[in-house]
Structure formats: structure tokens, C-alpha cells
Image (spheres, rainbow, N blue to C red):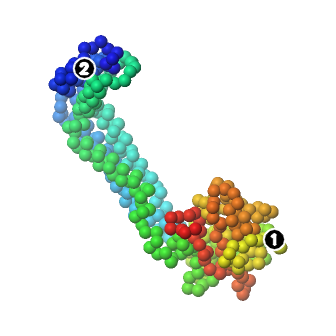
Amino acid sequence: MSGDTPTELPTEDELGQMSRDELVKLGLKMDGVELVHYEDKWPVKGTRAEKRAERTVALWFLIAALGGVAFLAAFLFWPWQYEPPTSDRHLLYSLYNPIIGITLGIAILGLGVGALLYTKKFIPDELAVQQRHDGPSAQVDQATVLAELADAGERSTLGRRSLIKKTAGLGAGVFGLGVLAVPLGGLLKNPWKDSDSSKSLWHTAWKPENGEKVYLRRHTGKFHEVELVRPEDLEAGGFETVFPFRESERNNEEALVHAIKSADGPVMLIRLRPGQPVVKRAGQEDFNYGDFYAYSKICTHLGCPTSLYEQQTGLLLCPCHQSQFDVFHYAKPRFGPATRALPQLPITVDEDGYLIARGDFIEAVGPAFWERKS
Ligand code: FES
């Protein structure tokens, strides 16, 4: 700093008249910096080798831009919704994650390699030695530091390399757009376009269609195997995870897989012990069938499966953040971050003795979202 050096300081007028080179030299001198080595990478400007180096750097930035465009396109348009292995579109679906990972990786790699190559090929080699000192910056220090920064910019030769500047800007710009697309991408699609469909957040796969019965089905580990649930299958105090099934889907492998895999489908079917006192939710007094109660398995906190049932206490535990829901009290949250009860599925038994849903949930399952009222 200027205060630590014996350099004779210029007046304000002299400072204003000094060229940038003079300011740089003054700054170095005042800071006690000694330039012990300086080597311009391209002492002869405009050679073919220099132009080749410039094109190499530009190529990497261009690769970054192409990677960014490909990432954006894949993120917005690649089919990402689940397709079963039997579907022709399964391959496309299964490539979604690799494609967005690879394209984003190419964009980052292109930017990184371009920046590294630029530093290697165009930034002059210099070695400076500086004494350390304390104290605040004087006005003269600020002026000289600014001049040094501008000088460094010029020596980096970036100012006159418009091809590199343009491709670097393009690569960084497209990459930035790609990064923005991740949080904003969801806003480009209207989630309420088809609010009545079972795919909307308001409904689940239990929504009856065309008056067809929706049975409670257990998952045997084989997607194509259909096993329906009868009340006598469950012992008092027992529980089971069940999924929706419609007769029209019996030989439709794709639909059978989808019913098991759909995120809002899993339901915890619980058989309470006989005589267990239960507090039912107002308006849902007839949702149970005798001692059988069916609650959405999707935690109302952040959507993990609430799979752990403790039959003595009637508590359903979500393993993610330890929310506990009281099955003896309409699955109201007792502990943990969840604030809403698990939605209850209205069930009954049909004339053949199978447990069936009497309708869809009367509220959205899973975590809260902006448009939810409760
Ligand atoms: S997702 Fe269940 S407690 Fe957080």
C-alpha cells in the first residue's frame, strides 16, 4: 500500500493526466511489487498458430452452448412419464435421466475446458513478488488498482478476441438458461389443465371411471398377477398395502404395472382389533368397513410412504421425518412435521366378498400444494 512505501505520490492533477501504463507502473512500485518474469504468449500477433488456438477455445464454448441447448430441449420435451417395459416408448422413457445428465455434463465440461484452455493459451506468463503490508486503501491505491485490472484485461487479449467472447457468452448464456429451466420448467406446464382426470393432483388412481368397480389388490411381487383382498385375508391388528384394480385392466399389462407404480395409489388397509374405540372424522363416519380402515400411504408432510404400523398404539410412522399418525383418531398427526391427517379411502365389500373402494379420496393425497385449501 502507498502508506508503507517511500514512493513519492503524484498530485491529483498529475494522477488525472497519467496514462494507464504509467498508473500500472506506479501502482506496482507503490505496492512493492516486483515483476520478475513476464512472457507474452503471442509476441507476434495474428499468426496462424494463434488463430488456431483461438478456434480451439471457441470450439469448446460452442460445445458448451450445444450441450446447453440439448439439455433445455430434453428437459422440456423428452418423454419422462413412466412407460412399462412392454411399451414401445419404454426405451425413450428410460433414457430421460441419462440424456439430461449427459447434456448438462457436456455444457459444464465445455465451459470448463474452454476457460482452462483460454488461460493456458492466452494469459501471459508472469511472476510477481510483493511485500505484504497493512492499512486501508488510499485514493491513489484505488486508481492504480483499477488501472491494473484494466491492464490485466487488455493483456489477457480477451478484448480483441471477439470469436472467443461471443462463443463464451453463448455457452454461458445457454448454460444459464438451462439452469433456470430446472426450477422454472414446471411452471411452463399447466398442472390444472385436466382437473377432473385421475392424473390431476385432485384425484388418484382410485377415481371410479365408467361406473366400474375399483377393487383393493395386493402386490405379490409380480406385476401381472392379480390378487384381490377379502376381509378374512387380514387378521385383527394386521395391515397390508393395497393398490387399485379394475376388471377391464386384467389382461392389460401396462395398466397393471401402472396401478402398482402410480405415486398416489398405495393405500394402507388396516384391520383394527374388535372393540377398539375409534374417533372418526366428521363427514367420514361411514368410510370404514367394520374394523377395516383404509388410509393413503402417502405422507402428508413430503410424500414418503408411511409404512410402519404399530398395532398396540395404532400409530403409523413415516420413516422420512418421523411423523406419526393416529389410526385410532382418523389418522391425525400426533408427532413430527406433518400437519394434516392421512386422507381416508371409503371402502366396502361387494356381493362376492371382495373389498372395494366406494369412491376416490375426497381430498388430495400427499403433501400440501399452493391451491389446496386445507
Ligand atoms: S415425509 Fe413423512 S414425515 Fe416427512
**Residue tagged 2:** 26
Report if residue 278 is visible in the image: yes
Q: Is residue 57 above or below residue 123?
A: below
- Give the residue at x 42% y 66%: 189
Q: In the rendered view of the protein, which quadrant contains the N terminus?
A: top left
Choose between 185 and 335: the one closer to the eye: 335
Q: Amino acid at mark 2?
A: Leu
Report whether 57 appears left or right of 250.
left
Q: Amino acid at mark 1?
A: Gln
> Looking at the rendering, which quadrant does residue 138 occupy?
top left
Residue 220 image position (x, y, % from top left): 68, 69
Residue 45 disc label: none
Residue 276 disc label: 1
Q: Is residue 267 above or below residue 129?
A: below
Report whether 317 appears left or right of 209.
right
Q: In the structure shown, which secondary structural element does the residue marked by tag 1 occupy?
A: loop
